[in-house]
Amino acid sequence: MTTNPAERPQLRQEDQLWITSEINQPSWNFISGFGFFFFSAGLVYTVLTSPLSGPAKTISALASLLIVVPGIYFIKIGLARIIPLRRLRKAVTPIAHLDVDAVHGHNPDVLIVELSNAHSYLITGPAVNYLAHTNVLHGSQRPDDLSFDFFSTPPTSDDAAASPVRMLIADRGSAVGNAEWYAEA
């Protein structure tokens, strides 16, 4: 992918707003994680500068350091979501490009697709709305004209988080959304 911003694919305004709203929640996880981290550092400093005995300082400092654990967890959760969304926003090379093999369901809010990796995914977000305003699934184009770029590893049955994707429609443009693992009940 080129580094020249003029040559990158341009996102629609709706897509940019959606990405911003999707970044806000994990950003709070990220900020909360640093809050835990600095709170723990403050407690450790307070314990070490207090007039406690050696064993009491050690136990108190270790207890204060335990507060770092949720902080690291929150930072990890935030980064796992923020980094792929930033990759999508900056139009860098996707991690995976998958073609659509079949479309199993479609309504105004959700698209269920089977991709070339033989897995089914629930697609949500502006991509579904954008698709509703085209004739891709209404006979004028085949689902072969649909493909998806994943900006994080495509989700599996073990993943709880969705992966940000860019849906590409041949000769019609692109839109963004989330892809979640879909398993029929």
Image (cartoon, rainbow, N blue to C red):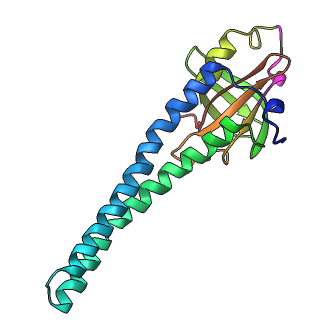
- The image position of residue 61, as x and y in percent, is 26, 78
Task: Give the residue at x 60% y 47%.
Answer: 83
- The image position of residue 127, as x and y in percent, is 65, 22
Task: Give the residue at x 83% y 8%.
Answer: 140
> Would you identify the image quadrant in which residue 81 lies?
top right
Foreground of the two, 10 or 160: 10
Count every numbered label the image shows and give the total: 0
- The image position of residue 164, as x and y in percent, is 62, 37
> Would you identify the image quadrant in which residue 84 lies?
top right
Task: Give the residue at x 46% y 55%.
Answer: 75
**Residue 155 in view of the camera:** no
Foreground of the two, 89 or 100: 89
Q: Which residues are magenta?
A: 140-147
- Left or right, 185 with respect to 141, comes to left
Quadrant placement of the N terminus: top right
> Would you identify the image quadrant in which residue 168 lies?
top right
The relative height of residue 1 versus residue 139 in the rendered view (above or below) is below
- Left or right, 115 with respect to 56, comes to right
- The image position of residue 11, as x and y in percent, is 70, 25
The relative height of residue 13 versus residue 152 in the rendered view (above or below) is above
Foreground of the two, 29 or 179: 29
Task: Give the residue at x 78% y 20%.
Answer: 173
Inspect the magenta stretch and tell me whether residue 130 lies in it. no
**Residue 178 in view of the camera:** yes
Foreground of the two, 114 or 124: 124
The relative height of residue 64 versus residue 164 in the rendered view (above or below) is below
Q: Residue furthest front?
A: 49
